[in-house]
Image: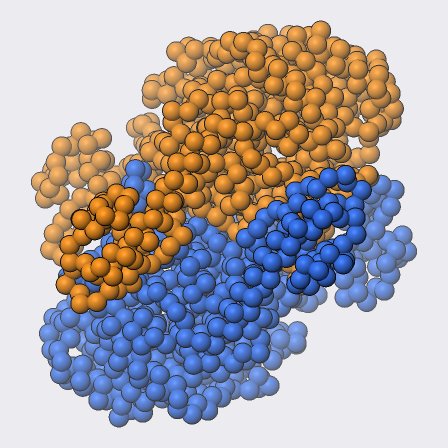
Chain colours: A orange, B blue
Amino acid sequence: MSWELHHVDVVIAGSPKPESVPVSWLKPGTTIINCSSDLLSGRQSLNNTTENAVCSLAVAIRMQNMVKNTERWIHSQQLRKWDLHCLKLQPLSPVPSDIEISRAQSPKAVDVLAKEIGLLTDEIEIYGQTKAKVRLSLLERLKDQPDGKYVLVAGITPTPLGEGKSTVTIGLVQALTAHLKINSFACLRQPSQGPTFGVKGGAAGGGYAQVIPMEEFNLHLTGDIHAITAANNLLAAAIDARILHENTQSDKALYNRLVPVVKGVRGFSSIQLARLRRLGINKTDPETLTEEEISRFVRLDIDPSTITWQRVVDTNDRFLRKITIGQANTEKGFVRQAQFDIAVASEIMAILALTTSLEDMKERLGKIVVANDKKGEPVTAEDLGVTGALAVLMKDAIKPTLMQTLEGTPVFVHAGPFANIAHGNSSILADKIALKLVGEKGFVVTEAGFGADIGMEKFFNIKCRASGLVPSVVVLVATVRALKMHGGGPSVSAGAPLKKEYTEENLQLVADGCCNLQKQIQIAQLFGVPVVVALNVFKTDSPAEVDLVCKIAKQSGAFDAVPCNHWSDGGRGAVKLAQAVEKAANQKSSFKYLYSLELPIAEKIKTIAQKVYGAQDIELSPAAQSQIDRYTRQGFGKLPICMAKTHLSLSHQPEKKGVPTGFILPISDVRASIGAGFIYPLVGTMSTMPGLPTRPCFYDIDLDPVTEEVKGLF
Amino acid sequence: MSWELHHVDVVIAGSPKPESVPVSWLKPGTTIINCSSDLLSGRQSLNNTTENAVCSLAVAIRMQNMVKNTERWIHSQQLRKWDLHCLKLQPLSPVPSDIEISRAQSPKAVDVLAKEIGLLTDEIEIYGQTKAKVRLSLLERLKDQPDGKYVLVAGITPTPLGEGKSTVTIGLVQALTAHLKINSFACLRQPSQGPTFGVKGGAAGGGYAQVIPMEEFNLHLTGDIHAITAANNLLAAAIDARILHENTQSDKALYNRLVPVVKGVRGFSSIQLARLRRLGINKTDPETLTEEEISRFVRLDIDPSTITWQRVVDTNDRFLRKITIGQANTEKGFVRQAQFDIAVASEIMAILALTTSLEDMKERLGKIVVANDKKGEPVTAEDLGVTGALAVLMKDAIKPTLMQTLEGTPVFVHAGPFANIAHGNSSILADKIALKLVGEKGFVVTEAGFGADIGMEKFFNIKCRASGLVPSVVVLVATVRALKMHGGGPSVSAGAPLKKEYTEENLQLVADGCCNLQKQIQIAQLFGVPVVVALNVFKTDSPAEVDLVCKIAKQSGAFDAVPCNHWSDGGRGAVKLAQAVEKAANQKSSFKYLYSLELPIAEKIKTIAQKVYGAQDIELSPAAQSQIDRYTRQGFGKLPICMAKTHLSLSHQPEKKGVPTGFILPISDVRASIGAGFIYPLVGTMSTMPGLPTRPCFYDIDLDPVTEEVKGLF
C-alpha cells in the first residue's frame, strides 16, 4: 500500500515520550496494526502506550481503513467499464509529421491513466511523467478474473515500406476505447534504437494513431533493451574469460580460486552446489572432492569453435559484423573470430518476450546454451554460474511499460525480439496483464512482426503455446499498394518514388494481387481463428479499389473486411474495424496448433513449409541435418520451430510475389535458442546487424537546449 | 505545475454543451486562465461560456491559486532548515553485510524526500519508489539564492583496498543532517556495472553509511551509463560507416545521398548548413555548389590510423581490449584494429560530469575530436552530423538522480568518469543543484576519486575551473592501515589476508607513514583550502594509534583531525567530524588554482609533477612531445591538464610508498578530450577495460524469484 499519511506519533516501548515514526512501521507484525479497524480494539491491544499515542494511532488506523476501502472499491471496479478520460483529437489536413502530432497532444499523467484502468498504487513504478512499469503481482491479484478477448494484428506479405500493422493496432484500440467505450489495450514491441538513428523507422504507429510521447517510446523507454544488452554481454564476457582462465591454470589453481578460503573457511556457493549436483557429485565439503571430481568441477572445456553466443549493441554498427577478439597481450594469444548483433537479436530478448514469471525467466536464462564442450555436450549459462546475475540485471525489464495512445487509451510496450531468428512478438506478460485489466468484455490487441506467414504462425505455434492463451480474432492488414505489387506491379523500394501503378487506379493489379491476401486468410484459418481484413487506406486508393479488396477478402473466407482511416483520422477512422472485430470475437473460435511438438524437427519444418508457405518440400543442407541430429541427441527435439525466412515473399525468394508454388525450401542451417525455447532453421542468410546508410536519419535529429524538445525524429 | 485537479467542464467555442477538458488546457495562452485569481475577472474575460462552465472554472482557478500559494510557500522555505524526517538506525554488532543493512531499512518514498528538501512537484521525475531525476530548471528558480558550503572529500594515497572516502562522504552527511540538523547533501559518482559483477566493489558507501537501496545504486540506476554507451557507440559507428561510404562512392554519389531530393526539393539540413559555414562556403542552395565545394563538403577524409574514438560496453570484457573490426565481406576489406573501453571511460561520461547546462553539453558533444583528417586537422562529432542525436540520447542523463542515505538524508548520484584518463569527480550539475537546495548555511559534500594528489588536484584545477564554484573545506580521509603501509609495512593486496603489522598496534609504522598524510595536507594547502583529516577507524586500530595520527595531522597543518566510526555506527559515528567540518567552513578560504591555463602544455604538466607529486622534473617521450605540438597547433593548448597516473603512489611507480622524491616523471603519450575540455598525459599505460577474474563476484549474486530480493551483492 502507498500511504497518504507518512508519520504518526507513538510511544515506543521503553521510550519516555512519543516519537514520530513512519506509518510503515505500523504494518502487520506490530501489535498496534493488528488491532483491526476501530480505536477501541486498537487501545485494547496496546501496551506501553499513552492516551496521546492512541489518539494519534486512531488517525493512522482511520487512514489505513480509508485506503483499504478504496482498494476494495478499485478491486470491485475491475470488471466494469473504465471511466477513462479520453484525449480529444482534432486531426489536421495534410497530416503533420509524427513527432509534430505527438508533441501537439498533452498526455495524461501516467499515474492518472493507471488509476483509470484499475491499477493499484503499489502495482506501478513511475518512470517520469508518461511511463510506468507494472508489477507482475497484479496477475496474482486478478487471477480469478476471466480474460478479455485476445486479438492478433498480422499482415499480408508486405512491401519493403511496411503496410501499417502498428498503426492499425493503435487505431483499433483508439476506436474501441475512445469511440465505442469498450475497454481495450494495445500491446506493442519496443523498437531498437539502432534503426531510430539509422534508417527512418520508428514503431510507435504513425499519423493520428500513435503512442505518445513518441520520442520516449523510440528512445531509452524504461531501459529494458539496455538491461538485455548488459545481461547478454556479461554472459559473453564470462565465456571468453572462463576459457582463458581454464587454459592458463592447473586444476588445483582453478579450484583454489573458484572455491577460496574465506576467513579460514572454504565453501561452495549455491550456484556451485547446483553444478556439483548436475555433475552427479553429491558432496558439499570442498575438502572431500577427489582429483578427478575437482577436474570435472573446474573445467567446462568449452570448444571455442562452437560458441554461438554473440555480443550485442543497440546501434547499427556494421563494422562489428565480423571481428577478431582477444588480440591484446593480456589474452595470451587466445584470439577468435566473433561478431556483434543488434541488441534486440539477443536470445535474452526472446526470453523476455516468452517468459511467464520471474521464476520462469530465471530458469530460461540458466538454460541458455552458449557452446558445446569438447565432448559435444551443451554448455549453459548455468554452468558458467551467471544465472543469478542475469536475473538480477533483468529484474525490472520483466515488468511491462505502460504508455498511452494519442487518444489517452492504455498501451503496453514490452520486448521486441527479431522476427526472423526469433519470433517477433511482444511479451506474453504484457498480454496476460492486459487481458486481466480489460476484463471479460474487453479487448487486448497485440501485433506480430512481418507477414502472417511468419509473425502469425510463430504467434500461434510458439507464443500461444508458451502462454496457453487462446486468440479470438486475427486482424489481417492489407494495403492496395502491396496487393498491386503482388498482382505484378513494379518493384517498390525504400527511398525511391512510387511508380504510377501505385498512385493511379488499377483494378486489374489489385484483383490479381488479392491471391496473397487470400492465402494469408487461409493460413489463419488453418489455426481455426476468424479473420477480419483491415484495409489500410491511402489517399491515392480509389473507392473502386477499396471495394474490390473488401469484396474479394470476404469471398476468400474473411469474417469481414473493412477500410480504415485511422492514420488521418485517429480512432474515428477505425470504428468500423472495431465493430467488425467485436462481432468476430463473438464467433466460435476453434483454435488449434499447426503441428505437434512430438514430431521430429524436420517434420515440423516441413509442415510449416508446406502448409503455410506453400512449398512442395524442404531441402536440408548437410550442416542443417547434422545440427538437427545434434539437437535431437541433446534432448532439444521437442521444441517448437521458429523459421528465419524473408518476410518479402511467402517463399524464400524475396522477389517472388503473390503466391509462389512448387518451390523447394532450402534450409541452410539450423540453430537453437534453448532458453527462449525454440529451434530456428535458417532459410538463407539473416543479417543480425544493420548498418548506417550514407545519410543516416541522425542528420535530422536535434535537441532544442532551451525547450528540451526533440526535433526531426520521423 | 502539477495539478491536483485533472479535468473541468467548460464550454468550448462553437460547442453546444459543457465538455470535460484537462485542466492543462487552461494554461497561459487561453483567455480563461489569464483572468488572474478571482471568479469575477474570470467571468469578464470569458466569451462563449455559460454560467455552468464559469462555476466549474471557479473550482479550477481556486485550485490553481492554492497550488500557486503552496508553491510560494515552498519557495519561501528554501532558505530554512529542512523539516526532514530522518530514518532511525539501530546498528548491529558485528556489522552485517552491506546488502543486509540496506535491505533492513525502509527508504522513504522519493517524492516525500523531494518535498522535504524543497523540490517542487514539477522539478522531479520519479523512477520507481526510491529514485528521481531532478530537472535543471531548479537552477533558474533559485538562481538568486546564495550557495551552501562546498566540501570535498579526498584521501591519502590508498592501499589497493581503498580507505573509505565514499563511506566518509555518506557518514558526514548523515551526521550533519540527521544528528546536527544542518541541511546537507552528498554528491556521489555512479558506479560502473562492470566491477559490480567482476571484482567485489560497489560505491554506495558501506556498513551503516550507505546509499539505499544499494542494489538500485549499483545496477542500472536511471540509465545514465546506458545512455552514454548508446551515444558513444552511435558516434563510433558513424565514424567507420562514413569512412566506408567515402571510400566506395564518388563525390557526386555521396552528394546525392547526403543531400537527396525529397518530394522534388533538395535542401541542406541545419547540421549540414553549419558544416558549410565551417568550411567557409556561404551557400544555402544545394544546386549552386561547385565541384570543388561539393568535394570538400562530402569528404571528411578521416585518416583511420588517427582514430582515437573507441567503442564502449559497461561490462568487464577483457577480450575486447584489442580487436580487429570490419572483417565481414560487406565492409569490403576496410578492416582496422580497434578496442572497447568500459563505458565510464567514455569522454561522454567526462562531458556529463563537467557540463553546466543542456546547451553547454550539446556544444561539448559537438566539439569531441574523434580523429584527424589526412591533412592533420581534427575531425569532430559535429563534422559527422551527430551532435543533435548525441544530445537527444543524453537528454535525460543530464538530470542528477536523487536517492537517500540509510538515515533518510538526500544524495545525488550523477556521472562517474574514470579517475586516470578522466577527472574522476561526480557532476558539476549535481553539486550546483545541491548547493542551492541546502541553502546558505547548508553543506554539500562531494567526493574525488583516488588520492588527493590526483582526484583533489583535478577537482580544483579542472572541475572547479569549469564550474566557477569555490570549495570551503577539504576532508582528507586516512586509515591507520594505509599509513602503516606508507611507513614501511608489508604490501597489501586484495584477496590476501592482512599481515599482523596491520592487525596489531605498531606506533612506529604509523608515525613513519604519516609523511604521506602530511604531504597530502600540504597539497590541499597549495590551493588555499582548510583541511580536516577524517581518520576512518577500524576495529583493529589501537587508541594510541588513533591519537598519534590525529596529533601528527594537526601538527602538519590540518585545521582538525577526527576519528570516525560511521561504518559501524552510522551518522552518530561522524558527528565530531561534522562539527569540525562546520568550524573549518567558517575559516577564511583563499582558494586559488595551481597553474594558469595560459602556460604551455608542458609547463602545466611540469607544475603538477613538481608541486603536487614531488617530482624533480618530467620527461616527455617523442610521441608525447609530438602530440603536444599537434594539440598546440590545433588550438587546444589552453586546456587544463588531466594526469593519467597510478593512484597507488605519489610517483608513477605504484610500489613507491610514503613520499617519493627526486624522481623524473615519464610522460609516455599525451591525448586529449576536447569535448570534456582537457589534455591527458599518460604516465605509463592505463587499462581502460577491466577483466573478469577466475571467480567473478557474480558467483554469489542471485535473485529470489518470489520476494524479488537481490542476494549476494557485496
Residue at x-position 77% and y-position 40%: B15
Q: Is residue B600 above or below residue A182?
A: below
Q: Is residue A384 above or below residue A534?
A: below
- Name the spot of residue B42 as percent of width and height, x first: 71, 58
Nearest the camera: B473 or B69?
Answer: B69
Nearest the camera: B403 or A30?
Answer: A30
| Left or right: A381 as drawn, with respect to A540 | left
* Residue B330, quarter of picture: top right
Nearest the camera: A57 or B512?
Answer: A57
Residue at x-position 25% and y-position 59%: A53
Q: Is residue B444 above or below residue B591?
A: above
| Left or right: B707 as drawn, with respect to B345 | left
- Name the spot of residue A271 as percent of width and height, x first: 24, 40
- Name the spot of residue A667 as percent of width and height, x first: 53, 19
Q: Is residue A351 above or below residue A36?
A: above
Asked whether the viewer can see residue B570, the reply is: yes
Quarter occupied by the C terminus of chain A:
top right
> Which residue lies most toward the left here?
A288
Asked whether the viewer can see residue B661, the reply is: no
- Name the spot of residue B341 as percent of width and height, x first: 47, 56
| Left or right: A51 as drawn, with respect to B222 | left
